[in-house]
Amino acid sequence: MKAILLTASRMFVLLMACGLAACGGDDGTEMASQPAVMARIEGSVIYRERMLLPPGFEVEVQLQDISKADASAAVLVSVLLTPGGAPPYRFAIEYDPAEINPRMRYALRATISDGDRLLFTSTDYIDPFKGNPVEILVHRVPEPVRRDGPSLEGVTWILQTLEGQPAPVGAEGKSVDIQFAVPELQAGGFSGCNRYTGGYGREGVAEQGSPLKFGPLAGTMMACVDGAELEHRYLQLLGRVTAFQLDGNTLSLLAGPEVVATFKAP
């Protein structure tokens, strides 16, 4: 009987020890979260103008979600550099691949600033996932020109004429319009059926007026009975624009010397 009791006692101790060990193992497995495996985008920011930047300038590179054409880009990750000297300015962005949705559209955007003053910005679409290294070309932002009446930016411009003819209205009787936003250098509005958005630049030389060029434009994908033909003509026309002129509250878009569209400020 004594031997049997001793054996049972030992078995109880062993079972208790195994149970505690098992519990400890479960806690360690379930409680400890696995660190995210980060991916890395590496590249450089450059500009082609022959100029020195002021001391203390900053270079910012953002990984953006640009999926929504009628909304501002959502910033996933950004890095801020104070490199000094001349370009190229090297950068590296780390991001969590688990946060990337293959159904969404992403882009890299770079800016160079001196305090609150934007000096350079990228205007072309840069695919963040095409492979390293990535090169981002930024363009100089012109100093704003003061005029009587509204400026180009910060105004909703309503389309009045298209290729010399009175502009028709789009779906639901709505007029085509356009807005220009600084410092993002993003243009967008209603194109006759859908909302559209895209980058623009004001660098270079124009035959007449002040330089203006639109980058690739993206739009929502609604189907309309009315306004689709107008939208097609209008968006194609924006791709031809080389300059703009302001005269009071009238904005004219030009392709070479030809005025291809006019707008009014409300």
Image (spheres, rainbow, N blue to C red):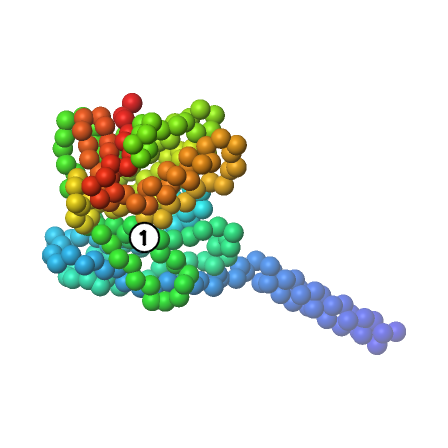
Report which quarter residue 160 is drawn in.
top left
The kind of residue on which mark 1 rests is Asp
Q: Residue furthest front?
A: 164
At horizontal 63% and vertical 62% (from top left) the residue drawn is: 26
Reply above or below: 246 against 217. Answer: above
Left or right: 189 with respect to 50?
Answer: right
Q: Where residue 228 sits in the image (x, y, percent)? A: 47, 36
At horizontal 29% and vertical 50% (from top left) the residue drawn is: 123
Q: Which residue is mark 1?
A: 124
Q: Where residue 199 sits in the image (x, y, percent)? A: 32, 45
Left or right: 181 with respect to 168?
Answer: left
Q: Does the rendering let one see residue 158?
A: no
At horizontal 32% and vertical 52% (from top left) the residue drawn is: 124
Report which quarter residue 10 is drawn in.
bottom right
Q: Quadrant of the C terminus?
A: top left
Q: Quadrant of the N terminus?
A: bottom right
Left or right: 73 with respect to 30?
Answer: left
Reply above or below: 132 against 112. Answer: below
Q: Secondary structure at mark 1?
A: loop
Image mark count:
1
Return the residue nearer the eye: 104 or 114. Answer: 104
Q: Does the rendering let one see residue 146?
A: yes
Report which quarter residue 154 is drawn in.
top left
